[in-house]
Image (cartoon, grey):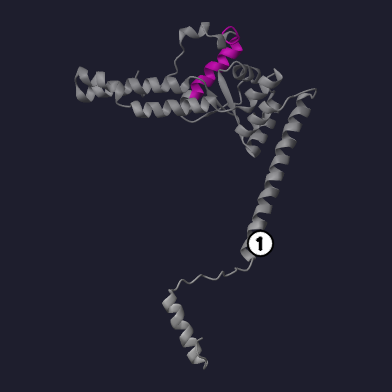
């Protein structure tokens, strides 16, 4: 299809995809996924905004089953978009190679032409997919996907302390007998306490460095190496200057 007529592709095999078991049969969930797919395609390679008209229960379900990643600031990332767009880009590169070179060898060589760029994009995509997600980590810890109010709380914590650090802290902290609110409050207080301790340690290091700079510099004597002949000559000159005779 021409570049002037953009589109989003739905594969028939999604009806058997485990991630769609609770989505394909629900008109609300499936419609929300389809709409978000179009928005993600339009925004690619940037992340996309969740529209205000999107049904929150459906958005939460899509995130819970792993079809989208919820990001701070009301944004999201659609799973599979990077792979689909890379495939289209490769097909366009192959067609361009045939058009410009005009022979079958160009088409055969075309897949290898962007191999380094393709490898770099794939590595970046895998790194983004493997990056810790605080909402997903909380879901694994508690068994319930965060409500919109909790997601806003997580977003605020991620902006203050970093998404990776927040996810790792949730992963390393048992919930115990705490309810969700007390658990997140404990996570928040722990992160703040760690930041406070780090700030105090940094201040102490700076104070220590300033004190070292203010200390007087001790000049150590530099040893002088002279030969026995020079030592004897210096001694005779000294004795002669002060009216003494060498022994």
Residue at image point 46% right, 11% down: 11
37 drawn magenta: yes
Residue 105 in the image, given as x and y percentages of width and height: 21, 19
Give, as a single range, the part of the protein colored magenta.
22-40
- Taking the magenta stretch, the answer to whether it contains residue 185 is no
Residue at image position (48%, 19%) is 80
**In the depicted view, which residue is nearer to us: 111 or 26?**
111
Please say whether residue 213 is visible from this viewpoint: yes
**Residue at 52% from the left image edge and 16% from the top image edge:** 34
Please tell me whether the stretch drawn in magenta is mainly helix, strand or loop: helix
**According to the image, label 1 marks what residue?**
211
Name which residue lies at 72% across and 32% down: 187
| Above or below 183: residue 214 | below
Q: In which quarter of the image is residue 33?
A: top right
Extreme residue in the bottom direction: 243
* Classed neighbour count for the residue bearing mark 1: other residues with Cα under 10 Å, few (<14), some (14–19), many (≥20): few
Residue 51, image x, y percentages: 58, 26
Question: Is disc 1 placed on a helix, strand or loop?
Answer: helix
Extreme right residue here?
A: 177
């Amino acid at each position: 299809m021409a570049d002037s007529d953009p589109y989003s592709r739905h594969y028939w095999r999604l009806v058997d995809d485990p991630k769609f078991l609770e989505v394909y049969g629900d008109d609300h969930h499936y419609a929300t996924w389809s709409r978000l797919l179009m928005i993600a395609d339009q925004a690619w390679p940037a992340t996309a905004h969740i529209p205000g008209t999107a049904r929150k229960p459906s958005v939460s379900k899509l995130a819970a089953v792993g079809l989208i990643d919820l990001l701070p600031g009301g944004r999201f990332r659609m799973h599979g978009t990077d792979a689909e767009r890379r495939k289209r880009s490769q097909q366009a590169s192959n067609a361009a190679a045939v058009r410009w070179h005009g022979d079958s060898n160009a088409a055969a060589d075309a897949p290898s032409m962007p191999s380094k760029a393709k490898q770099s994009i794939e590595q970046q995509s895998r790194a983004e997919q493997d990056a810790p997600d605080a909402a997903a980590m909380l879901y694994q810890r508690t068994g319930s996907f965060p409500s919109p109010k909790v997601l806003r709380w997580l977003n605020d914590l991620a902006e203050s302390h970093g998404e990776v650090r927040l996810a790792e802290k949730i992963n390393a902290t048992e919930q115990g007998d705490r309810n969700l609110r007390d658990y997140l409050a404990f996570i928040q207080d722990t992160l703040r306490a760690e930041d406070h301790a780090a700030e105090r340690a940094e201040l102490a290091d700076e104070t220590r460095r300033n004190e070292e700079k203010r200390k007087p510099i001790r000049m150590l004597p530099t040893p002088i190496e002279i030969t026995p002949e020079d030592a004897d000559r210096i001694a005779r000159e000294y004795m002669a200057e002060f009216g003494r005779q060498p022994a």
